[in-house]
Image (cartoon, rainbow, N blue to C red):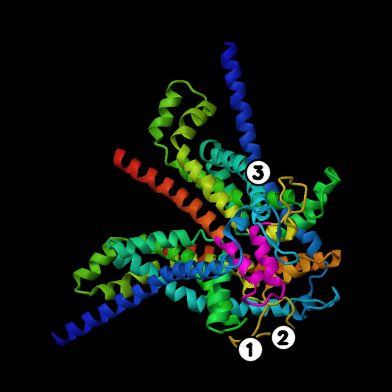
Amino acid sequence: MNRNLQTKCIGFGIKFLLGACASFTVATTIGIVVVLFSETSEFFSQVPLFDFLFGLSWEPLLEPKSFGVLPLVSGTLLIMLGSGLIAIPIGLLTAVYLSEYAKHRTRAFIKPILEILAGIPTIVYGYFALTFITPMLKQIIPSIDVFNALSGAIVVGIMILPMVSSLCDDAFSGVPKSLKMGGYALGATSFEVICQIIMPASASRILAAFILALSRAIGETMAVTLAAGATPHFTLNPLESIQTMTAYIVQVSLGDTPAGGIEYLTCFAVASLLFFITLVMNILGQRIIHGIGKKGGQNS
Amino acid sequence: MNKIKRRKRTEKIFLWASRLLSWSTILILVVLMAHILIEGTHYLSAGFLNNFPSRFAAKAGMKAGIWGSFWLMVMTTLISVPVGIASALFLEEYGIKGKIGKIIEVNVSNLAGVPSIVYGLLGLTVFVRYADFDRSLLSGALTLSLLILPVIIVASREAIKAVPNTIRYAAYALGAHKHQVIFGHVLPVALAGILTGVILALSRAIGETAPLIIIGALAYVSFTPESPMDEFSVMPIQIYNWAGRPKAEFHQLAASGIIVLLCLMLTMNLIAVIIRHKSSKRMNL
């Protein structure tokens, strides 16, 4: 009897210990929010919120200082749009090919390639952009800057491509086989089945895949820091040198800025904006995926 | 008749377009690797692995980076793996029905999407400044641990989920307590799967650059770390430093560094594949 009690106590202790470990992740989230919020509120006690969100000039490191975040946002947007233009068509069609056309052996060959592309560190992509893609672009478009948004967008596109294709692949495999077979029975070609049955049936999950991948592109750091430059311009011209939100944070960290100074605080303000944008996109993407999962479960 | 021809032609064009784009991913990988190999072999030598950073490309090496990365990975493993596995066990075996379990679950999937640079700022504020660990290996390892914790938890949960319930029931039937079932039966069976996930998470951590720059890891270090409180550099930061210089010879050095880094990651992935292969064999028996 006594031994039983002892085992029960140990069991309770272990449960408590495991629970404590699991709550670490919650503590991390709270930590992120608290850190970002406290430093950002300090920043906004010195700079008006309106100037930050709608100002067209970002010069926090040089006098006269100005703290309009829009140039960084436009730079980030440029990278996001450019990488999306590359990753979305290629990723989507790769997923279509892999799930509808490819033989098992082809699939078994291309899938690991995509996994390798996804596993390559972002610093390697940055190096590739700087020393291979930019010189190549320079030959095609001689007027392009050494650091330019286009080169950064291309590599970020390559980087998020595996994510787009694997999430789309998952989306396609969620379409009931009977729907597809119905289409083929009516004499449709594969192209018609894909465009008129599979895509509409998985449209929301494909959308979720795009959102999640683009959110990843926004948070991308080293590739754009190396390839896209460090000059915050309010521009949508991909041939110019720009600066993204993430690249700015790296730039400040590499310099010797004293803790608590306004330059130091700008990092946190920019990071808060970045965190907010990616969080909204991630929640949206996951909501869509989970919402569909639930509905499908009820139907079947 | 004409219409059918047109439909068939569209079909063919579409098939070839998607086929071409799929195979283009292989082309991308081949070009990327070829470029790095061509650029990087020039400076790749025993000296490169044994020298500290230098102003002269011919004398520069990444000893500090290799040792820094090694220390950092060992420490990150020691911190993140026990916590990650424990969290996964809690979520799968205890918590999932309760409200707390639900909150933690949503939280983990959101954390996985947070940009790594934000973790860097968290580490900078909490570990470097608040806890006063300074720019040490410890700060770096703690930051990276937080970063890969969600990945480890997700992978471990998959592995634990794959353990057949019959094993649990058999243990319960013999009168085992819950924690005895978990540590005596569930964990050993799931261990191979967990290990695979852990290695993949670590191979992500070893290439991570941005958060370490934020917490202040250095590019110029001419010593190998000797304790967790030492300052450090890591391979990706050395690569970044070289790639960011205007001179072409330093770009070649960066490529050499990338080769070393990728070889390490490849080895780690290979180990993961072997473990997965071996364990699937054992499970079939």
Give the left or right position of residue B57, taking residue A272 as reference: right
User: Which chain is mark 2 on?
Assistant: B
Q: Are marks 1 and 2 on the same chain?
A: yes
The residue at which mark 1 appears reads as B226
The residue at which mark 2 appears reads as B223
Q: Residues within 10 Å of mark 1 (few under 14, many from 20)?
A: few
Helix, strand or loop at disc 2?
loop
The residue at which mark 3 appears reads as A86
Q: Are marks 2 and 3 on the same chain?
A: no
Q: Position of residue B265 (x, y in %)?
A: 62, 66
Q: Which residue is rendered at x = 65% and y = 74% of the image? A: A261
Image vertical order of residue B214 relative to residue A159, above or below: below
Q: CA distance from mark 1 to mark 3?
A: 45 Å
Nearest the viewer among A132 and B178 is: A132
Q: Which residue is rendered at x = 86% and y = 65% of the image? A: B247
Quadrant containing the C terminus of chain A is top left
Nearest the viewer among A172 and A52 is: A52
Q: Which residue is rendered at x = 53% and y = 62% of the image? A: B273
Q: Position of residue B256 (x, y in %)?
A: 76, 67
Q: Which residue is rendered at x = 38% and y = 71% of the image? A: A23
Q: Residues within 10 Å of mark 3 (few under 14, many from 20)?
A: some
Give the left or right position of residue A284, taking residue A110 as reference: left
Image vertical order of residue A92 relative to residue B281, above or below: above
Residue A58 falls in which quadrant of the image? bottom right
Give the numbered dot on residue B26: none
Q: Given contact means CB atoms under 8 Å apart, are the residues at marks 2 and 3 in contact?
A: no
**Magenta stretch bounds:** A244-272
Q: Are marks 1 and 3 on the same chain?
A: no
Magenta span: predominant SS is: helix
Q: Position of residue A272 (x, y in %)?
A: 55, 62
Q: Can the viewer see residue A66?
A: yes
Nearest the viewer among A288 and B52 is: A288
